Image (cartoon, rainbow, N blue to C red):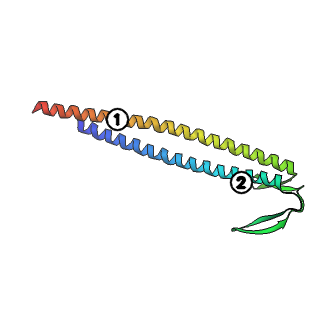
């Protein structure tokens, strides 16, 4: 009878281990998401700095894609095209563009905080599962010790 219980305990431990592994993978995916958000935030910061530094008549290097750039002269800083999201862009003044970028940055910060909260919840759940696994291991060891003692007593 106890052999079946021990096997069941092993199965439960294996299930807990699988759950912990799944949670760890989910946590890693969320951490990767935070890295992406941080990169996006850095790009926004660079755009805001560029808006402050560039003036009409400035020479800049414009990315063409694939790591290629071309030098260009900024003719007019009064009209800036800003990506609004969902494949929409709008022509804005420098001040409006800076405000839009600041709002985007705030939104990214909120997303980062949301993901950090999800990670904290996962870590809490992982901690509970680890404690549960430790308790099960201790119970199994106690049962094995009791069985060994009973066998010694019977001999």
- On residue 136, which mark appears? 1
Q: Describe residue 66's horizontal placement relative to residue 74 as left or right.
A: left
> Which residue is at 77% across, 45% downward?
102
User: Disc 2 marks which residue?
Assistant: 43
Neighbour tally class for label 1: few under 14, some 14-19, many 20 plus, Cα within 10 Å: some
Query: Is 154 drawn above or below residue 83 in the view shown?
Result: above
SS state under label 2: helix
State the residue in front, 24 or 60: 60
Locate residue 137, reporting x and y percent. 33, 37
> Which residue is at 78% across, 69% downward?
70
Locate residue 28, reporting x and y percent. 53, 48
The reply to whether residue 83 is in sight is: no
Locate residue 144, reporting x and y percent. 24, 35
Locate residue 66, reporting x and y percent. 69, 68
Neighbour tally class for label 2: few under 14, some 14-19, many 20 plus, Cα within 10 Å: some
Specify the quadrant that holds the N terminus: top left
Whole-Å distance between the Cαs marked 1 and 2? 49 Å
Q: Earlier in the sequence, mark 1 or mark 2?
A: 2
State the residue in front, 78 or 5: 78
The reply to whether residue 150 is in sight is: yes
């Amino acid at each position: 009878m106890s052999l079946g219980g021990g096997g069941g305990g092993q199965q439960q431990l294996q299930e807990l281990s699988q759950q912990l592994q799944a949670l760890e993978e989910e946590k890693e995916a969320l951490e990767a998401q935070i890295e992406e958000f941080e990169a996006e935030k850095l790009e926004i910061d660079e755009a805001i700095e560029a808006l402050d530094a560039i003036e009409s008549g400035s020479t800049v290097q414009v990315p063409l894609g694939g790591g290629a750039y071309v030098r260009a002269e900024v003719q007019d800083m009064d009209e800036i095209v800003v990506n609004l999201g969902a494949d929409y862009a709008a022509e804005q003044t420098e001040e409006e563009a800076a405000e839009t970028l600041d709002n985007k940055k705030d939104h990214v910060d909120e997303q980062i905080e949301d993901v950090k909260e999800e990670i904290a919840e996962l870590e809490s759940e992982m901690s509970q599962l680890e404690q549960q696994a430790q308790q099960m291991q201790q119970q199994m060891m106690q049962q094995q010790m009791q069985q060994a003692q009973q066998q010694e007593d019977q001999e």
